[in-house]
Image (cartoon, rainbow, N blue to C red):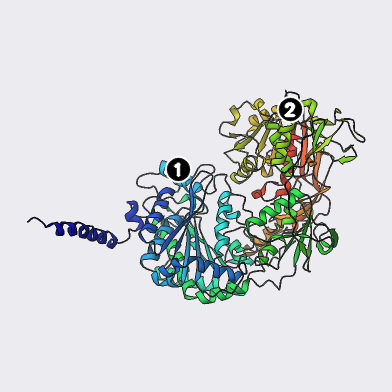
Amino acid sequence: MQLSRPMKQLALPLFFVVFIQIIVAQPLKSPSEFLGYELGNNFTRHHQVVDYYRYVASQMPNNVVLEEYGKTNEGRLLQVAYVSSKSNIDNLEDIRQNNLKHTGMVSGTGNDDTAIVWLSYNVHGNESSSTEASMRTLYELVTQKQAWLENTLVIIDPCVNPDGRDRYVNWYKQVQSWPHNTDQDAKEHHEPWASGRPNHYLFDLNRDWAWATQVESQQRLKVYNKWMPHVHVDFHEQGINEPYYFAPAAEPFHEVITDWQRDFQTQIGKNHAKYFDKEGWLYFTRERFDLLYPSYGDTYPTFMGAIGMTYEQAGHGRAGLGIINDEGIELTLKDRITHHNTTGLSTVEIASKNAQKLNQEFKKYFDNSGLKYKSYVLHGGADKIDAVKTLLDKHEIEYGFANAGKVSGFQYSKNGSGSFTANNEDLVVSTNQPKGKMVKVLFEPNTKLSGPLTYDITAWSVPYAYGLEAIASTSLVGTQNISEESVQNTKNASAYAYLSEWNSLKDAEFLSQLLQKGIKVRFTEVSFTVDGKNYDPGTLIIVRGDNKKFDDLDELVISTANRLDQKLSTASTGFVEKGSDFGSPNVKLVNPMRIALLSGGGVSTLNFGEIWHFFEQQLHYPITILDLAYADRVNLDHYDVLIMPHGWYSDDLDDGAMKKLTTWVSKGGKLIAIGNALKRFAGKDGFALKTKDSDTENKEDNRLLPYADQERDHLKELITGAIYKTSIDTTHPMAFGYPDHYYSLKLGGNSYDLLSSGFNVAHLPEGSIAVAGFTGDNAAARQGNSLIFGEERKGSGSIIYMVDNPMFRSFWENGKLFLVNAIFFTNNNKFRI
């Protein structure tokens, strides 16, 4: 039958209406349906995870909203999903503003009790089950658990570390057997060097929350501070024989943690236990994972008022799709996903049931009236003050500049009471602000320990780390706003030389840029006075006569300095009033050093990454990365400096390799050994470095010590990240830019004797004790008269010994200049043409 014209016009739209209704009525695809394989039968690459989240958001716009918050070093997407009821999604901004009113970050009184739960997955790339679990958790929240979402907003970050995750997943797919091999010896259970755990620069992002040195952390914190959730969970994996860990956490707890935060962790743990008990799954609580060090994914949120927790599933980078553990049980990816999915949902459930109480207690957390220290006043070089300001800006912590006058309190340099006269360049950070408790945690001179058994370091105070004098005052110190102006140097075509002081990393970056432009730069090994102004050793001198090939020398130097906010002076003559003239042997040309950095084998991925990141992202100076797998075939004469990061070299550098290194050093090479790398030299023939022996005569006889007491007794040998005040030989080029002392972060109990032949640049005097952090009694006894940084000359070259790692997690800012000095200033006797 032929349709009439009106019917034809009506029929087509009706067809599409029915078609659209059929599409809309289709159920949301589960992760398995969307991906084309059952979740847990395969690993999902990051772009596929992104695609699934986009799919869910497109299908359920009333319940899921995505926010892309950044990209990784390798260009992978970082995103969060906001998951809630339609009403809450429609009012996201109101919920956010009301929550910030609870904190005091926004003025007004909050009138909303929506619980905000943030779930973070896969901060360690090879702890790979959690991103898979995030997809199932998202799916089940919007299809089965909608009732919880009526009063709860769930923020899901499906993958904090996409670069590390894809490194692991891509490697696993390349080597896995089909079907997967559960034998622990199989290749698929043994990742190669670097592994998928860290990010692109091989940083542990779960130690970077407070220091925010990495792009992933910096971008994530902007979103985190925008929301300030009430509950934050960091999903992890642990060894294959450790079933599952969840809250409550282990001691020590930092003293700013409230009774409510402790109690609610227990409530959450009991809710998880209910589900685990039902299934007969094993788990443990209150062990190993404490809440002290502020840079974790559980502690940082905790110190920002949240219930911060770590959940640890058995697996890690060894488990693959399945592995037989030591108890003969196969641990599968499917099981790992299920366990993380269970605790994720359980967390949302208990938060939803306690939404009002969560909001009430969250608001109470931001009362900082009970904190002992009201203000921290920091005094020192402008570049170092700027570095602290940059750190505070990342956390949106408020600060000001001091009024002129005396401030008194705990003085960091005296490790006790003291005072100094403040000026308007001194930074003041006070605790009478919403994030006052975090200020206390970051700046307090000595963290209170309820017990020495801790998962990480026990000292990190910002003034020590940044090389600043400081006062912690029990009185609120007044501040003023100072308008800051960028440096604007001007050309001086008649100047004999441009001069730049040397005391910060900004100065080092300036040198780096000049050298890469081919500009010849000198540095002085002695103090001098010219044109009525005094200059210290290390001062950079750009002499016009050295750089005649540049017609635009003034423009090059001035533009570089202005871009880096580097203040320059000029000298009208090379004839100084005091000290050495600019043509003296004491004023040397800086070599544009060719630097190689060892990787692979037993090299610590973390220390390697710290150094790599430093050169590329802070110093902006080129290096060549060598792998130990082929380093013995490298012609070292192509390099001036070789850096051996912290690591274990006994299997990688045999006697032949050590002889080759020694020969290269003797011909003028410079070898820099850090941390455990020193063990390859200590006590060996031909090297001055010696391990400092323990006092065996007075050592306790512990042969009959009960088994249960042995772990605690071993603490006597340990230093768990303690701060020591060292003495500095300021005349040595490696120490230029430093005063006569330096606060070093000691990460272990190893100690070395002072060099009998060589230069002891930094050492611990007899009787040295930690100014902050835990040191075991036996380890403490070995620290007096011990080496921290030293130089041993061999032929025309040098070996630099760095007992303590000045690059640790890239947050110990004040140590980094030692490395720069070692490279460019130390034993710089011959300019390479």
Instruction: Give the residue furthest to the left.
Output: 1
Residue 762: numbered disc: none
Quick check: 508 above or below 24? above
Residue 769: quadrant of the picture: bottom right
For the point 68% across and 39% down, which residue is it? 680
Q: Nearer the viewer, residue 581 or 707?
A: 581
* In front of the other: 571 or 728: 571
Total count of labels = 2
Snapshot quadrant of residue 278: bottom left
- 332 left or right of 636? left
Residue 668, numbered label: 2
Label 1 residue SS: helix
Could you tell whether 147 is left or right of 616 in the image? left
Whether residue 814 is visible to the viewer of this picture, yes or no, is yes
Q: Which residue is mark 1?
A: 171
Residue 39 percent across, percent down from the top left:
37, 55
The answer to whether residue 777 is above or below residue 832 is below
As drawn, is 416 to the left or to the right of 609? Answer: right
Q: Residues within 10 Å of mark 2 (few under 14, many from 20)?
A: many
Amino acid under label 1? Trp
Residue 214 or 520: which is nearer the viewer?
Answer: 520
Q: Is residue 258 visible?
A: no
Along the line of sight, the residue nearer the viewer: 17 or 578: 17
Point out the image quarter for the N terminus: bottom left
From the top left corner, tell me how far across and down residue 106 is, in percent.
Answer: 60, 67
Q: Earlier in the sequence, mark 2 or mark 1?
A: 1
Q: Amino acid at mark 2?
A: Gly
Name the outermost residue toward the right.
577
Residue at image location 42% in from the left, 52% down from the top: 50
Residue 496 picture location, percent across and down? 83, 30
Inter-mark Cα distance, 2 to 1:
40 Å
Q: Is the residue under label 1 in contact with that under label 2 (CB below 8 Å)? A: no
